[in-house]
Image (spheres, coloured by chain):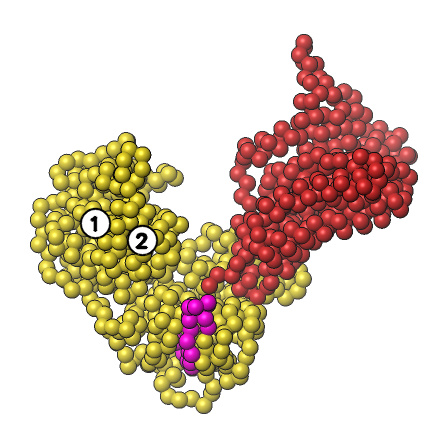
Amino acid sequence: MSVQNETGRQATVAPTASAPAIELRGISKAFGPVQANKDISISVAKGSIHGIIGENGAGKSTLMSILYGFYKADAGEILINGKEVEITDSQEAIAAGIGMVFQHFKLVENFTVLENVILGAEDGKLLKPSLAKARKLLKQLSDEYELSVDPDALIEDLSVGHQQRVEILKALYRQADILILDEPTGVLTPAEADHLFRILEGLRDQGKTIILITHKLREIMEITDTVSVMRRGEMTATVKTKDTSPEELAELMVGRKVLLRVDKTPAKPGKPVIEVENLEVIDEQGVKRLKGIDLMVRQGEILGICGVAGNGQTELLEVLGGYMEGTGTIRMNGEEIDLTGKYSDGQSRRARGISHVPEDRHDEGLILEFQAWENMIFGYHHDPKYQKNALLMDNAGIKAMTQVSMDKFDVRPPNPKLEAKSFSGGNQQKIVLAREIERNPDLLLVGQPTRGVDIGAIEFIHQQIVALRDEGKAILLVSVELDEILSLSDRIVVMFDGRIMGERLPSETNEGELGLMMAGITDEEKAQ
Amino acid sequence: MDYLTILQILDSALRLATPLLLTCLAGLFSERAGVVDIGLEGKLLAAAFLAGAAAAVTGSIWIGLLAGVLGSLAFSMLHGLASITFQGDQLISGVALNFLAAGLTVVIGQSWFKLGGRTPSLSGDGRFSEWNLPFSDAMAKIPVVGPAYDELISGHTALTYLAFLAVPLSWWVLYRSRFGLRLRAVGENPGAVDTAGISVVRLRYSALVIAGVLCGLAGTYLASLAAGFVKDMSAGRGYIALAALIFAKWRPWYALWATLLFGLLEAIGNRYQSIALGDFVIPVQFMQALPYILTVIILAGFVGKAIPPRASGQSYVKER
């Protein structure tokens, strides 16, 4: 079945005679006292891309896990192509034609692509015939859908984007007609995400049904035909994408009006806070990651650094934050700081007025097993004001201080004794942000402030960063989200391959131009 | 050192490597499936005791073999119950089994045979007989090749041949069969196996069944070799097999070479009780400690980088 793109879209608009690919009726599921799914009904038309949007913890993943046989629903029925089915394990979901691409890939890292594709779907007791068959089919699929991957490559050697293709190929090899993707773009670069969307559109046009779970409004608007919104375990609405707007969806998700654009006044830059000249960094493998970076951030402005992940932004943050050594000159408030040796560590940087919200809050920002109040003083634990006497820390005082910060930064639940891992992503990020901002730094380094963070929390985090700027602090923002860079920054710098490709003002540029710069294409090359 | 001496040492190395190789392959199967098997030692001991006891009572080593394998299998399933079904800590479960075996064998042995924990000596059909391969007498007269065939290749028990056959067989199963692919996958990423619709639990139990049988063979071999069970007769071979497994980077062919090396060291230690270097005489204790010293060196990580199966030691819990 080959349908044109246009008719594919219309198929969901006009009522069709054929039964929906998936119909859920009254699905409920509780985990102990938590009602993860409440009486959910949804119908997904064949040959359409159906988005499911909602904040973290809204119950999207639970719903899909029920569909894939990981959990058994407490109540409700599932119909595939109009026929009621009982899905009690993954094997039955696969047999019903459902394929799932998980957020965290289910691939065996030291197996080849082929071995991963046939795992569980082998034709007989011996591998040889299965591998040969898979090789043939893989070639066919990769020609058809731009899904090319080297069948003999080991998974661990593939980029994240390619690993995801393997997951899609796995589903197609099992002849899935319904493909569920859980937050597929979270780990992808913008270019990889675009490629994925082209693949999905190709699959849709071949009559496959696709369910896309995401919390990114832009993706929903860009690619889906219909969209369902979930909030706190309930399905709050299902609408045609062309009849809705990002603002309306955001409101449905959060339950109140959300400001999608950042509300800020023009910057009033003061004198330079940090000046970086000819900064170079060579990593442990001897690869030059920064190749002569020059930049400067003034008081009262936000400098946004955009670029595809892995082009030196991480290293830049790490050198400035003091946990990577480099060469060059960095002046903080006019005084040079050490880039190597004893005084190039994080503690010395903090003493100079540099605070750092790291890119990876799980690995670098927090200790997940520790409680919120303990996390609230990491890096500052030697501060005399936290000591009770020469031997003991003032735990009661720290807890009280944490309580105040948690209230101020709207961390929910505001309980200092909760382990960091039991907060949602947005609230974890608020804890890190509170710790760093409450130090009253001259310069705040922020890496990926809203990665994996709910829309409501994004709004709050953005407001906090702008408020800090308005206090006259300098802010260096690194983000792979172009939206975020464009709406938050006062000046934008694009990094590519360890170099700065150029600087733009947000009012004078757009995603297209920045996208080209992020791909390393200069003005001269463009002119040709 | 003449040619014949070398052959005799090598021959003895093969004999001594046999139980190590079987145990090492047992560990390979269970660890490749993601179940750390520190209880190899206990299984070995339990099998040796039951094989020794059954062979002594019935007079047939083959019934002893059956008893040994069943005993080892029971221990393996106990390990599975604790670490797979109830998702307990695999190390603790394994160590507990080792203690259990060390204690039970002696206590039951004493109350059963009243020989201070030993089983009665085995003789005749109570031990494995050596297989003299065809033409070994005739070929022995051919220079160089003949003695090698006669001394080295011929004249081992069935279990030795079986152990060496188990190497290519294991390789073939692991890398050429569907079962092997799934087994290796479950030790690397059980999530991938589960989402592919295959039971993680069943796969891991299958691996433990194989491990149990192989350990049973190894234990029975020990009992037959020593003509009966003696307290603590496994003498740390379960741990040595684990070290060999790490040395072998969890691969069947490497496991063969690793266990042969351990067997050779043990054989040399047995043959040369003391070596004089000028005025200094290396004490016999040092020679006999050679395999254990190598174990310590390997476990301390001096031999290259060995990456274990990624999910080994972790019980599988479905994520939300």
**Quarter assignment of residue B2:** top right
**Residue that appears at 16% across and 45% down:** A442
Report the disc number at residue A438: 1
Q: Cβ–Cβ below 8 Å for labels 2 and 1?
A: no
Q: Position of residue A241 (x, y in %)?
A: 31, 78
Numbered disc 1: what chain? A
Percent x, y of residue B135? 89, 38
| Protein chain holding label 2 | A
Between A114 and B64, the residue placed more toward the observer is: B64
Read off the magenta span: A29-52
**Which three-letter amino acid code belongs to the residue tagged 1?**
Glu
Image: A343 above or below A180:
above
- Spot the yellow chain and give its letter: A
Local secondary structure at mark 1: loop
Relative vertical location of residue A470 with respect to residue A387 in this rendering, above or below: below
Q: Which of marks 2 and 1 is in front?
A: 2
What amino acid is found at the position of numbered circle 2 in the picture?
Answer: Pro
Residue B310 colored in magenta in the image: no
In front of the other: A138 or B170: B170
Local packing at callout 2 (Cα closer than 10 Å; few below 14, some 14-19, many 20+) is: many
